[in-house]
Amino acid sequence: MIDQSRRRFFTRKALDKEVARLPWVANLATFTELCTRCNKCIDSCENNIIVAGDGGFPLVNFNIDECTFCYRCAEICPEPIFKGMDEKPWTAKAKINDSCLAYKNVECRSCGDLCEPMAITFSLQAGGVAKPKIKLSDCTGCGACVSVCPTSSINVINT
């Protein structure tokens, strides 16, 4: 009889679907299946934000910098796992959690200052500080807001 618990040891770990992998990845399952973890995308990234994640699979680390959507990672990849540059890079969007300074009544607008598409706006509160709001339709998921957040309250996740 086959011991299924031992068999699972040799299967690939399922990747977290919320983690922003790489822009223009056509399909996460195909990415997991075809990515050889050659690190060409990591070496080609102009902002050095692509790092090896779980199992050596590349992912974007926005704590380092933002994605400029240069398309180098897709161009250098020898595997057919990327969409064309004319398509939307991904569905990833910024999300602000409860540890945001503004939610604790401390004035901070760091994220909004660096948001080039101006997807982060601030709504004034009577007797309080302005709270950030992300207009998801304008957010490109570039991650410019992540590394500047003093409390690491912003993540870019797949929606």
Image (tube, rainbow, N blue to C red):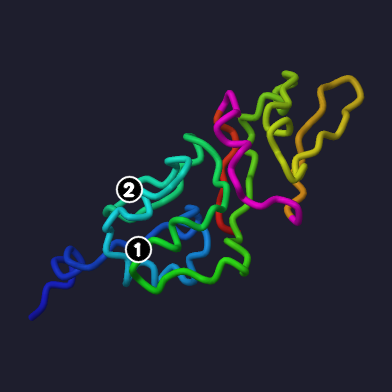
Q: Residue at x 77, y 41 (%)?
A: 133
Observer-nearest of 8 and 73: 73
Q: What distance separates the C-alpha of mark 2 from that of mark 1?
A: 15 Å
Please tell me in which quadrant of the rendered image residue 145 appears. Answer: top right
| Predominant SS of the magenta segment | loop
Taking depth in this image into account, of 75 and 35 the one nearest to the observer is 75
Task: Name the amino acid, label 1.
Answer: Ala
State the image coordinates of residue 59 (x, y, percent, origin top left). 41, 51
Q: Is residue 145 above or below residue 28?
A: above
Eyeballing the image, is 141 above or below 1? above
121 relative position to 99: left or right: right
Q: Position of residue 93 (x, y in %)?
A: 63, 52
Region in magenta = 137-151
Q: Is residue 128 above or below residue 111?
A: above
**Position of residue 77 in the picture relative to residue 109 (left or right):** left
- Residue labelled with disc 2: 52
- Rendered-image quadrant of the C terminus: bottom right
Q: Which residue is mark 1?
A: 14
Q: Nearer the viewer, residue 10 or 45?
A: 45
Task: Report helix, strand or loop for mark 2.
Answer: strand
Q: Quadrant of residue 143?
A: top right
Q: Nearer the viewer, mark 2 or mark 1?
A: 2
